[in-house]
Image: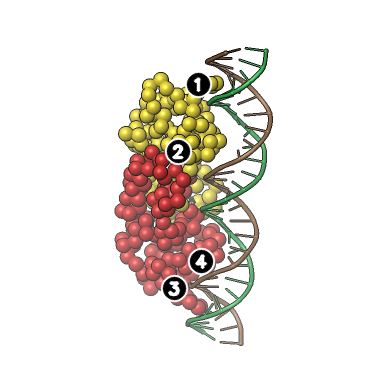
Chain colours: A red, B yellow, C brown, D green
Amino acid sequence: MLKITRKAEYALIALRHLNNIKDGELATVKEISTQYGIPQELLAKALQQLARAKLIEATKGPYGGYKLVTDPNEINMTKFFEILEGPMGIMDCSFDSGCNQLNACNIRTPINRINDSIRTIFDKLTLADITY
Amino acid sequence: MLKITRKAEYALIALRHLNNIKDGELATVKEISTQYGIPQELLAKALQQLARAKLIEATKGPYGGYKLVTDPNEINMTKFFEILEGPMGIMDCSFDSGCNQLNACNIRTPINRINDSIRTIFDKLTLADITY
DNA sequence: CTATTTACGACTAAATTAGTCGGGTATATG
DNA sequence: CATATACCCGACTAATTTAGTCGTAAATAG
Ligand code: SF4
Ligand code: SF4
């Protein structure tokens, strides 16, 4: 309950790694996955999503790899998580209208407030905060 | 991702309901489940957990049911969720030491900070805030 | 040409959550 | 006492989500 996914954690680890390597250097999925003990294919998929979203940039072929191409201060965690996992919310009705309880629900408003405070935390948090 | 469980939501709905009924009155699982469209057996289990934890009190037999026996200001959400779902944390290493990445992990400290801020939100939130 | 590395979708496996069932205990009422 | 009502509780199944794997393709350095 209230967990972030493994995939997201792996991606964060990789992003922090990418942020720490020398300017102009690249890191491969293989390097990262062995260094941190992360299943390679899974990390690969996560990084592909981040590349599609232009947070990182890929170079194919030998001596290829990934590098960070966005200012860590510009990537907030809400955006980051939503790239990887889609809409984020502690309850369904925050992004989906198919809840059976919707019409009779007596807690929607307060739950929404909680959701907003959590969202605010992630909105304010940037990759730089994870990396500092 | 980052979702609270249905069971927890159902329990909150029920608690708010219990908080709003007249002093001395009881509400049965059946009443609550039909009023809000909640699967009866599932709600029953949740309320049994809350009863075991002494947040609410059960009366058996005809005219029986549940009533709230704790000051809503005294029940914080962390406690509430942990009664229903066990230890709460956005990542495993906050309560379990079996993470493969643990030794090499480069994000544990910052993730922990995030976890703490979320926990703080729930620590400060009481049932009264859900009920107001 | 070959080895390396990303891209991508389909697939399987594992874990968690949601919901059901069956048999029990307590109790108000007649 | 018999009965109906309501909580108690654990074991079970089903559904959904998350985790991880696999096969194939495309780009590129040497
Ligand atoms: S808050 Fe109420 S309406 Fe929203 S998902 Fe939860 S139960 Fe459904
Ligand atoms: S923060 Fe690091 S050590 Fe903790 S659970 Fe996530 S990967 Fe494992």
Question: Total marks drawn?
Answer: 4
* Disc 4 to disc 1, C-alpha distance: 60 Å
Is residue B94 something that shows in the picture?
A: no
State whether discs 1 and 3 lie on one chain. Answer: no
Closest to the camera, between mark 4 and mark 2, is 2
> Which residue is denoted by mark 3 in the rendering?
A58
- B6 displayed left or right of B16: right
- Which of marks 3 and 4 precedes in the sequence? 4
Kind of element beneath mark 1: loop
- Which of marks 1 and 2 precedes in the sequence? 2
The three-letter code of the residue at mark 4 reads: Ala
Q: Is residue C28 above or below residue A42?
A: above
Q: Is residue A90 above or below residue C3?
A: above
* Disc 4 to disc 2, C-alpha distance: 44 Å
> Which residue is denoted by mark 1 in the rendering?
B63
**Nearest to the observer: residue A97 or residue B116:** A97
> Which residue is denoted by mark 4 in the rendering?
A44
The three-letter code of the residue at mark 1 reads: Tyr
> Which residue is denoted by mark 2 in the rendering?
B36
The three-letter code of the residue at mark 3 reads: Ala
Kind of element beneath mark 4: helix
Where is residue A60 shown, x and y percent of the image?
A: 48, 77
